[in-house]
Image (cartoon, grey):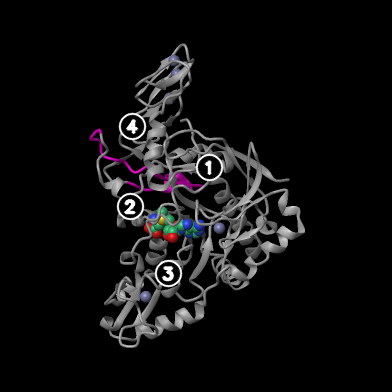
């Protein structure tokens, strides 16, 4: 039976629009678009198939569920079997070896053509306006995220790289859990770090196919995390299964950092499908979700814990190198605190932040929390979500933001500023959310925490 998960979309102006549900079911029988199988969406007006790739406006495939039953529509959609692109990973890898054998000044990458080449022997002529990066040292070849122009197109790739500190934190967590195999989904900087260390084994699954220029075929899969689609089909499936098999004894973790606006339901579904494949390959009959470290905005917490209750949010604020908003101050002069947290089913006590003065150990919760977070004895937890110190409301029986007050007429805690009884004003949560929505055209839905 397909399961439905109700979410409300939030348009960039903070206005609520009609709820859109994603129907979670096997997508392999769905119509295709250039990004693999579509997802089934459901609104008040009806159900339709549309692109799974995060908010890809260029993708025009939109098929009503009823129409999909028609033979002619199915026939027309068949063209995608041959239209969906594939990459020649073996050729890309032998090209890499060839380029790497050259002096570093003779190595170049054309970002426009996504082509790594030898300057003295270009395989084709790169036009004047092409973005060429040269020279390329060995170190640069092994860490492409340090120089590849980031695709900051928020509506699709939304690439934001972890700072060194955040990468170190990830590896510390994995070490504390005796995990040495990493399935990197949309986390190329974690993959690069793992590849530079002998104590970790890793594979990168990412939608940015430029990475295929730098890795052997068994180290990179061109992938869409919203429909668990591998563009090279069977060949990639074999690669993934081999990776799973090899990681049977060393512990494995999925480290995932989706574009900020991605929807929670298909991502959880992807985690479940990858888990099922792993359990099948490694002959593990239990159905516990594979360990996961998932970077996502804190206000997605209700959605994630609703769909996968074993995944908990940790207070660590993940930092990004190229996120202007995270480096600047907000209009009211406060430092913009990263809204991105780790969601994980690993024990929160294994996240050791003893070297970071922004965090303290809560002796009641028994894990690290932000120094501004205080333990609420009534809730039995450190309740702040966003770096502000929350306060407890005895009527609502929960902690709320410090800017909230309990309105007797509304019978709940409301944002103090501009409060008009009965009228829902844009709350602090929504304001933070729209900050991120400006970064990533947030579509994960509204939530009220
Ligand atoms: C927010 S960035 C995360 C990068 C990460 N913080 C790091 O330092 O490695 C999102 C990543 O997901 C990838 N991505 C975007 N859409 C994707 C999709 N539909 N499927 C798989 N990967 C995707 C991007 O190419 C990018 O690497
Ligand atoms: Zn598409
Ligand atoms: Zn070019
Ligand atoms: Zn606590
Ligand atoms: Zn409380
Ligand atoms: Zn209250
Ligand atoms: Zn009121």
Q: Nearer the viewer, mark 3 or mark 2?
A: 3
Magenta segment range? Answer: 332-353
- Mark before the other along the chain sequence, 3 or 2: 3
Disc ID at residue 320 = 2
- Vertical placement of residue 347 versus 219, above or below: above
Left or right of 288 in this view: 123: left
SS at circle 1:
helix
How far apart are labels 2 and 1 at the CA level? 22 Å
Residue neighbourhood size for the residue with mark 3, other residues' Cα within 10 Å, grouped as few (<14), some (14–19), many (≥20): some
Q: Residue at x 56, y 41 (%)?
A: 309
Q: Residues within 10 Å of mark 2 (few under 14, many from 20)?
A: many
Quickly name the residue at label 3. Answer: 210
| Residue holding disc 4 | 388
Dominant secondary-structure state across the stretch colored magenta: loop
- Cα separation between marks 2 and 4: 20 Å
State which mark lies toward you, 3 or 4.
3
Residue lying furthest bottom in this view? 121
Q: Who is closer to the viewer here, 102 or 283? A: 102
**Label 1, on which residue?**
304
Cα distance between the residues tagged 3 and 4: 40 Å
Inspect the magenta stretch and tell me whether residue 447 lies in it: no
Confirm whether residue 196 shows in the render. Answer: yes
Q: Can you give x and y, in whole percent of width and height, for residue 302 in the image?
A: 51, 36
Beta carbon of the mark 2 residue lies under 8 A of ligand 1: yes
Image coordinates for residue 251, horizontal then vertical, percent: 52, 60
User: Residue lying farthest left?
Assistant: 333
- Which residue is found at the position 42% from the left and 48% from the top? 350
């Amino acid at each position: 039976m397909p399961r439905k998960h109700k979410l409300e979309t939030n348009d960039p102006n903070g206005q609520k629009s009609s709820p859109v549900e994603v129907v979670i079911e096997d997508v392999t029988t769905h119509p295709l678009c250039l990004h693999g199988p579509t997802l089934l969406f459901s609104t008040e007006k009806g159900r339709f198939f549309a692109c799974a790739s995060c908010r890809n406006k260029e993708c025009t495939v939109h098929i009503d569920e009823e129409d999909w039953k028609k033979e002619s529509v199915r026939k027309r959609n068949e063209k995608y079997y041959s239209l969906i692109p594939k990459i020649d990973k073996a050729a890309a890898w032998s090209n890499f070896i060839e380029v790497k054998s050259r002096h570093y000044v003779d190595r170049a990458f054309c970002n426009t053509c996504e082509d790594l080449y030898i300057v003295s022997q270009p395989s084709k002529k790169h036009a004047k306006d092409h973005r060429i990066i040269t020279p390329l040292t060995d170190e640069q070849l092994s860490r492409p995220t340090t120089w590849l122009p980031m695709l900051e197109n928020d509506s699709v790739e939304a690439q934001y790289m972890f700072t060194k500190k955040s990468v170190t934190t990830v590896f510390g967590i994995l070490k504390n859990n005796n995990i040495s195999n990493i399935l990197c989904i949309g986390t190329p900087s974690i993959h690069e770090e793992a590849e530079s260390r002998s104590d970790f084994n890793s594979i990168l699954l990412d939608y940015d196919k430029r990475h295929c220029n730098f890795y052997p075929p068994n180290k990179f899969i061109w992938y869409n995390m919203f429909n668990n689609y591998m563009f090279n089909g069977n060949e990639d499936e074999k690669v993934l299964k081999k990776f799973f098999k090899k990681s049977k004894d060393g512990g494995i973790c999925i480290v995932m950092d989706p574009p900020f606006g991605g929807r929670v339901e298909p991502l959880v579904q992807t985690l479940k499908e990858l888990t099922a494949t792993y359990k099948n390959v490694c002959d593990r009959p239990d159905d516990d979700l594979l360990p996961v470290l998932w970077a996502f905005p804190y206000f997605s917490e209700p959605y994630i814990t609703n769909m996968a209750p074993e995944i908990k949010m940790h207070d660590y604020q993940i930092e990004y190198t190229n996120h202007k908003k995270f480096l600047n101050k907000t209009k009211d002069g406060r430092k913009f605190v990263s809204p991105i947290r780790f969601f994980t089913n690993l024990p929160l006590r294994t996240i050791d932040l003893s070297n970071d003065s922004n965090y303290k150990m809560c002796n009641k919760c028994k894990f690290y929390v932000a120094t501004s977070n205080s333990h609420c004895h009534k809730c039995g937890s450190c309740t702040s979500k966003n770096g502000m110190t929350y306060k407890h409301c005895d009527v609502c029986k929960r902690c709320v933001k410090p800017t909230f007050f309990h309105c007797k007429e509304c019978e709940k805690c409301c944002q103090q500023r501009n409060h008009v009884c009965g009228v829902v004003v844009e709350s602090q949560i929504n304001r933070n959310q729209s900050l991120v929505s400006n970064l990533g055209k947030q579509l994960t839905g509204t939530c009220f925490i």
